Image (spheres, grey):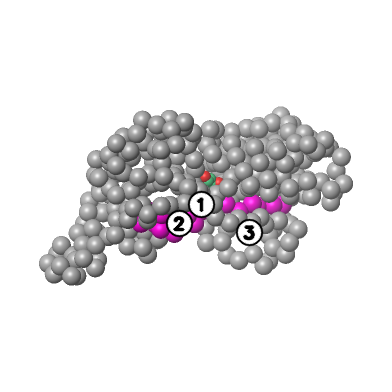
Amino acid sequence: MFIKKMSVLLFTALLVMGITGCGNTEKDSKDPKLLLGFSQIGTESAWRIGNTLDIEQQAENYGVGLMLENANQKQENQIAAIRRFIAYKVDVIAFSPIVEDGWDNVLKEAKDAGIPVILVDRDISTDKSDLTTCLIGADFYNEGVMAGEYLLRKADELGLEQINIVEITGTENSTPMMQRQAGFFDTIGADERMNVLESIDGDFLKSRGAECMRYLIDTYGDSIDVVFSHNDEMTIGALPEIEKAGFEPGKDIIIISIDGGQEAIDILKQGKINCVVECTPKLGKALMETALKLKSGEEVEKLIHPEEVYFSDEQDTSQIMPRGY
Ligand code: AHR
């Protein structure tokens, strides 16, 4: 798979570099400005697919040669990809770590090879601060806060006295899972009406969202007032299970989701989701600009968070612009 991708890339690089017979001036003007190796987590969500497309598009816009590898949701595949990028002597390595732990050894290898590493989307947990240069990704904690603040407003609006919440979380030990949960719990924690029945791992997958919801309904039945789901995919998996059990999502059960992809926004407009917090996958521009700066030895910002908003039944949802992912 990688070999195939590499040959396509090499072929493209040869074409771009003008090694097909053009003179030097021509060749220089079309040289990729740098070679970037990027290890993507997988294709688990519309968000992830949108993120990959955005990175590919921006690499083209910025004249960056991109070696892209899909790890199919496996950390060992990401580690192997990073090792291949090192062997290939790319200029810069970027990756979206599926989980936070377990990266020190391979990142030390990149450091020893003198290749700077950019974290995209998710963070790592390490006590060695010099293994990566920067992080370009969402403020997941703030996304959890926005979700919690929506719920506090909704509880006031409905005059609810006790609110039973189930949480379907993203991949265990991943940055969005931990930070979204922390932001949400910190926001609702002091409110005595809020009661979390259970948090369950849905791994950011639609199929797991459905399984988790079936289990939650079997276990808690009609006592569930709120589903807080860490991404749209799991929400979209959970909704039919709620309907099959005879409940109306968005009315009998408050539904809060994160990502803001087009499908979830369309469901919000139908009234079956109450609030969707945005998590933008459009990180490609900042990634290319940062990689180019690193190549030319410039200082880079340590942390780049894109601006994010939320969409909810408190607003005129017909005004929400097409999302593009
Ligand atoms: O890391 C970002 C999260 O990963 C998105 O919320 C989710 O949809 C994706 O799979």
Q: Mark 2 points at which residue?
A: 286
Q: Name the residue under label 1.
A: 304
Q: Which residue is drawn at 15% across and 62% down?
A: 19
Sequence-first tag of 1 and 2: 2
Q: Which amino acid does label 3 sit on?
A: Asp
Q: What residue type is labelled 2?
A: Ala
Report the span colored magenta.
Answer: 274-292
Q: Do the residues labelled 3 and 2 touch (CB within 8 Å)?
A: no
Image quarter in which the N terminus is found: top left
Give the CA separation, mark 3 to mark 2.
28 Å
Sequence-first tag of 3 and 2: 3
Q: Is residue 284 magenta?
A: yes
Give the CA separation, mark 1 to mark 2.
8 Å
Q: Name the residue under label 3.
A: 266
Residue 226, percent from left and from top: 74, 41
Q: Which residue is drawn at 37% across and 64% down?
A: 61
Q: Is residue 254 left or right of residue 266?
A: right
Q: Can residue 244 be seen in this view?
A: no
Q: Which residue is drawn at 53% across and 33% down?
A: 173
